[in-house]
Image (tube, rainbow, N blue to C red):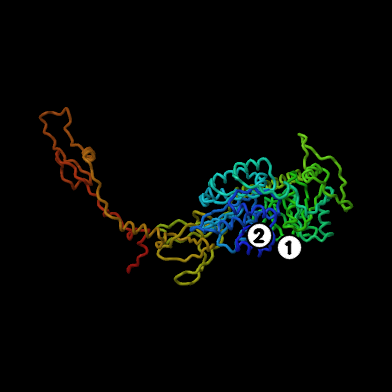
Amino acid sequence: MNFRDLGLTAPILKALTQEGYTDPTPIQRKAIPPALAGRDVLGCAQTGTGKTCAFAAPILQRLSKAVPRPRVIRALVLTPTRELAIQIQDSFVSYGRNLPLRSAVIFGGVGQQPQVDAIRKGLDILVATPGRLLDLHGQGLIDLSRIEIFVLDEADRMLDMGFIHDVKRVLKLLPEQKQTLFFSATMPPEVMGLVNGLLHDYQRVAVDPVSSPVEVIRQSLYYVDKSNKTKLLAYLMEERKITSALVFSRTKHGANRIAQDLQKRGISAAAIHGNKSQTARVQALSDFKAGRVRVLAATDIAARGIDIDQLPFVFNYNLPDVPETYVHRIGRTGRAGREGEAVSFCQFDEKDELKAIEKLLGRPIPVVEGHPFPMENFDPPQKDKRGRVVNAEDAEARAAAKEKRRQKDAENKAKAEERRRNASAPAEPKARPFAPPVSQGQKNAQPPAPQEDAPKKKRRRKKSGGAQADAPAPEPAGLVLRDKPIGRGVRQGRLEETLPDDPALPVTEFYKPNPLESDVIMDATARLLAPRRPAPQQTAQTRQKKAQAQKQALPRPAQAKKGKKQGAPARPVQEPVLPPALAGQKKRRRDDRPRPIEAPLRSDRQKDSTQHKSLMRPYYLHDDD
């Protein structure tokens, strides 16, 4: 059977031929026909068996029948890791190169703007990780209401990484009527519960027994102490002339340590794990695929879905706790029917993990004897207070993380102490203070003699004559702001150019305000152009209060003293002496009411800006000057 017999169209067959595909794998032969018919598919197969092509080819063929305008997302592929998402997107691009369809990939750890731009241009197929998909949907940037085909890849890995709740949230955003393609290497009870609630009238496709390794992979086991694992790894790399190897570590700290130790021994190596940035992870994986790096040390984050062409060796530096993880690790080699070899190191306290793996495989792993670093430590594993076995790698990783946090806290504490000392230290003034403006009477006064200890002032060139001053001017005392004098302006009757010490903050030490400054000009112009303000309207109550106040302000006429003789002539009554402000007013009658007083625009004594002594007047030229 070939791909043409599966019912694929000519554009997809041409692309598969260009990729070097000749005969379909078992999972492809069983999954592609029901997927093309629109049925739900439950695929159970090991990694490296061609699952990506098993769901990518049917999606491309079904969506290419009619492309809506504008484009909407009609197919969604959900994956657990960023590396797997990038790989699936590359497969869609390769298989659909002859079709008018668009696809894009989104994942976390990088900026979202390029991904958002690709979505806004219009997509047919979207490959995503759960976190970034929910984030962009929450921002209203992704519409999932038009999904026709949904693919959940590596469902058991989703469960192991804690993404099962995110997957359930994504399922609530999808329409009820859709085709679902479900792929997983293992089928634990939690995954089966998700299958029963998601798939309807599905076709089950199983290739190999659950969690069984690919038969073409050769497996071997080395018993070695923990301290000699790196030495044994370097020895095997040189003795067997290994050009490319993927080494799995139990912890992130262990992956970094493996890469560093191999580099010290002259073997190029790089590390990839969850604490690395997305850029660093992509760069390390690209260097490894291109052959620039011989060894890639990785945690289980790289155990699923990473397709590395012609990877000959996989090393289990530490045996995993979960037996199924061992199968996923060694599945990185021997892909697409090629041969590969998986080498495992086992120390004395990892024998329980070895028994669980061999139980899952149904056979023991062949042991290699006679290597230069045999196991010599047979001490029983350490246990915690609750009687649980303490893994040496985990304990070392926790100790390294604790030491790293302690060093970081010490650095932060030292920086805070240095900032506190710098803030408490008194700042020495570096600039000269400015002098207050001199009065009119001090114009011609001689300046005070400078003190002997005072620093000499730099000689400056006058703007008018250009000659140099014969004697340095005294430095006036005044206010200092930001270590620079804040006085700005001109001396009495002339301008002077000042050369500041700091060109970034030009300052002068003139005695009067600068008339060309914007605030001075605005102030003078505002007074000249001030409009006449009409007098406020006075109410009857206000006028009555003002009349009473003015009446009380008038002096009362003098009266005759009591006790005088009645026959005495009356003394003439003197007229009241009015205040100067009321001297020109007529005598009011009782029935007269005070009239509203209009406030003039400007009194005769008020000076405008041109007459003001300290503003504009000194800068006008007169013949009599």
The C terminus appears in which quarter of the rendering? bottom left
Closest to the observer, 322 or 16:
16
Judged left or right of residue 520, residue 189 is: right
Sequence-wise, which precedes: disc 2 or disc 1? Answer: 2
Judged left or right of residue 74, residue 537 is: left
Residue at x 54% of width, y 53% of height: 74
- Outermost residue toward the left in this view: 567
In the rendered image, which residue does mark 1 sit on? Answer: 291
Q: Residues within 10 Å of mark 2 (few under 14, many from 20)?
A: many
Residue at x 63% of width, y 62% of height: 13
In the rendered image, which residue does mark 2 sit on? Answer: 3
Q: Secondary structure at mark 2?
A: helix
Residue type at mark 2?
A: Phe
Estimate the spatial distance between the alpha carbons at disc 2 and disc 1, rounded to whole Å. Answer: 32 Å
Toward which corner of the image does residue 394 lie, by quadrant?
top right
Q: Residues within 10 Å of mark 1 (few under 14, many from 20)?
A: few
Residue 439 appears at what percent x and percent y?
40, 57
Closest to the observer, 67 or 461:
67
Q: Is residue 412 visible?
A: no
Closest to the observer, 389 or 428:
389
